[in-house]
């Protein structure tokens, strides 16, 4: 059964060269249980609220197996929270999660919304050459989630998949088509992206899933449905 290895929230705001001037990417594990509400974990912070956080990016999950991959690649530990994640999970392929999939974690119900797109703040956090490109090409992004039902979570909780939408579009598929990962190039795959976008929009239209505003916009653009 998949389990929650660690729950992480901001430790301290760090100076950053970006436009905001600070970053809340320094997440670290906490002890005990923490409340989860629509905007994320109690006492967590997003410094750049224009690009991070909000209802559709309330919680960020990353897999221990992907962290182990990077630990071997980088030659150093990748402890929970280093990538800015709130949830470090084991036994669950987060990248293969279907958009709109729901997870029961503790007493909270969470829903997968979109992949994490790496930014330069993340690159500065890791201090590795070409980090944003490397992270993109690996297609081990982790997933953002929205909170469907408030609750409490803690390390050791099981992570149960309680609903998987039939449209089948996964975090990894969407990210690969958008950034061209499948071709080994940092170029989009517009044909595949259009097909995936149409599946997502159709599922959204019939109420199978609820896409966030950003995913609706990107899907409409990819499917040629954007209002002119």
Image (cartoon, rainbow, N blue to C red):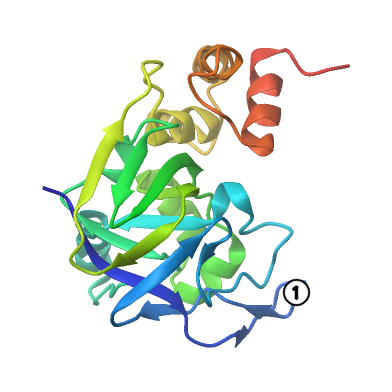
At horizontal 28% and vertical 75% (from top left) the residue drawn is: 79
**Circle 1 Cα neighbour tier, 10 Å, few/some/many (<14 / 14–19 / ≥20):** few
64 in relation to 111, above or below? below
For label 1, the SS is loop
Judge whether 51 appears above or below 122 on screen: above
Image position, residue 43 (x, y; %): 53, 77
- Could you tell whether 68 is left or right of 53 in the image? left
Q: Nearer the viewer, residue 17 or 99?
A: 99
Residue that carries the numbered disc 1 in the rendered image? 20
Q: Position of residue 108 (x, y in %)?
A: 37, 53
Determine which quarter of the picture holds residue 90: bottom left
Camera sees residue 105: yes
Relative placement, left or right, of 27 versus 46 is left
Residue 83 visible from this viewpoint: no
Tell me which residue sits at (58%, 59%) in the image. Answer: 39
Name the one closer to the observer, 115 or 164: 164
The residue furthest right is 228
Measured as percent of width and height from the top left, residue 37 is found at 52, 60
How many numbered circles are shown? 1
Q: Nearer the viewer, residue 119 or 128?
A: 119
Q: Position of residue 162 (x, y in %)?
A: 28, 35
Q: Residue at x 63, y 24 (%)?
A: 219
Which quadrant is the C terminus positioned in?
top right
Is residue 102 shown above or below 62?
above
Tell me if 135 is positioned left or right of 94 in this view.
Answer: right
Nearer-the-camera pick, 184 or 150: 150
């Amino acid at each position: 059964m998949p389990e929650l290895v660690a729950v992480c929230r901001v430790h301290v705001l760090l100076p950053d060269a970006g436009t905001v001037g600070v970053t809340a990417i320094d997440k670290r594990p906490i002890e005990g249980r923490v409340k989860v509400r629509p905007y994320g974990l109690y006492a967590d912070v997003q410094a750049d609220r224009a690009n991070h956080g909000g209802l559709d990016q309330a919680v960020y999950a990353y897999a221990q197996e992907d962290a182990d991959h990077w630990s071997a690649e980088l030659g150093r530990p990748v402890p929970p929270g280093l990538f800015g994640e709130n949830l470090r999970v084991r036994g669950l392929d987060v990248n293969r999660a279907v958009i709109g999939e729901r997870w029961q974690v503790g007493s909270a119900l969470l829903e997968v919304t979109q992949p994490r797109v790496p930014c330069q703040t993340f690159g500065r956090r890791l201090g590795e050459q070409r980090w944003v490109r490397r992270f993109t090409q690996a297609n081990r992004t982790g997933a953002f989630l929205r909170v469907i039902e408030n609750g409490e979570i803690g390390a050791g909780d099981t992570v149960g998949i309680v609903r998987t939408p039939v449209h089948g579009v996964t975090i990894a598929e969407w990210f690969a088509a958008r950034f061209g990962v499948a071709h080994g190039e940092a170029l989009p795959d517009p044909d595949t992206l259009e097909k995936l976008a149409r599946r997502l929009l159709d599922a959204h239209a019939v109420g199978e899933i609820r896409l966030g505003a950003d995913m609706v916009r990107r899907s409409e653009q990819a499917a040629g449905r954007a209002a002119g």
